[in-house]
């Protein structure tokens, strides 16, 4: 399944995550490895911790809720995850990986979040940071609106299709 771009992203993130956890002195036992596996697979776009816990249960994982939250906290602290609040104040996470950088469209009608990538937007943000004289360490963009019918709303949230993912 090496041709599956989502799997490729998951594998690259997992490699980095294992390195970072190790460098931080965090041992990766079976339970923690299972949590990281599910995050890599299911948190490529914004997802709540409860959804990850449910997915771990479906996969037969036994990690306690507290240990799952600890993995989220450690991964966030190590810069492996970013997080943002949804409209109801819940925290959602997604993995950080340069090649899966993207932003989000929010459909006014359904509240659904759809990932997108736009080179011109990225260039404009870099230029704005330069004009402001800041060394940019990150940025977030969320566009809200009515999704035109030619955009097929995806079920859940998927990584963008045009960021050069795919077999390297
Ligand atoms: Zn996303
Ligand atoms: Zn961006």
Image (cartoon, helix red, strand yellow):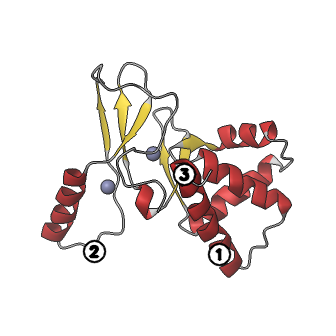
Task: Name the outermost residue toward the left.
Answer: 131
User: 12 and 111: which one is in front?
Assistant: 12
User: 37 and 8: which one is in front?
Assistant: 8
Residue at the spot of label 2: 135
Q: Nearer the viewer, mark 1 or mark 2?
A: 1
Q: Tell me which label, 1 or 2, sits earlier in the chain.
A: 1
Q: Secondary structure at mark 3?
A: loop
The residue positioned 80% from the left and 39% from the top of the image is: 57
Q: Nearer the viewer, mark 3 or mark 2?
A: 3
Q: What is the crowding at mark 1: few (fewer than 14 residues within 10 Å), some, or many (at least 20)?
A: few
Query: Quick check: 100 left or right of 55?
Result: left
- Give how far apart the Cα atoms at labels 3 and 2 are: 36 Å
Q: Secondary structure at mark 1?
A: helix
Q: Where residue 101 appears, x then y in whole percent?
A: 40, 56
Q: Nearer the viewer, mark 1 or mark 3?
A: 3
- Give how far apart the Cα atoms at labels 1 and 2 are: 26 Å
Q: What is the crowding at mark 2: few (fewer than 14 residues within 10 Å), some, or many (at least 20)?
A: few
Residue at the spot of label 1: 19
Label drawn at residue 57: none
Residue at the spot of label 3: 3
Question: Against 66, is 78 above or below?
Answer: below
Question: Against 137, is 111 above or below?
Answer: above
Query: Quick check: 64 left or right of 168?
Result: right
Q: How many marks?
A: 3
- Give how far apart the Cα atoms at labels 1 and 3 are: 24 Å
Q: Where residue 105 appears, x then y in whole percent?
A: 35, 36
The residue positioned 55% from the left and 39% from the top of the image is: 90
Q: Tell me which label, 3 or 2, sits earlier in the chain.
A: 3
Q: Where residue 53 appears, x then y in whole percent?
A: 73, 42
The residue positioned 48% from the left and 38% from the top of the image is: 86
Query: Quick check: 60 left or right of 23?
Result: right
Q: Tell me which label, 1 or 3, sits earlier in the chain.
A: 3
């Amino acid at each position: 399944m090496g041709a599956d771009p989502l799997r490729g992203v998951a594998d690259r993130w997992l490699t980095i995550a294992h390195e970072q956890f190790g460098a931080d002195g965090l041992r990766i036992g079976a339970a923690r490895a299972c949590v990281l596996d599910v995050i890599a697979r299911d948190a490529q776009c914004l997802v709540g911790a409860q959804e990850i816990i449910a997915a771990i249960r479906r996969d037969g994982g036994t990690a306690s809720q507290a240990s799952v939250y600890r993995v989220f906290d450690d991964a966030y602290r190590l810069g492996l995850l970013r997080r943002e609040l949804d409209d109801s104040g819940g925290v959602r996470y997604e993995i950080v990986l340069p090649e899966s950088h993207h932003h989000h469209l929010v459909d006014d009608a359904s509240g659904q979040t759809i990932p997108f990538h736009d080179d011109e937007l990225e260039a404009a943000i870099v230029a704005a940071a330069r004009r402001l004289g800041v060394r940019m360490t990150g940025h977030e963009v969320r566009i809200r609106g009515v999704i035109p019918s030619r955009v097929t709303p995806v079920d859940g949230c998927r990584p963008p299709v045009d960021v050069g993912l795919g077999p390297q």
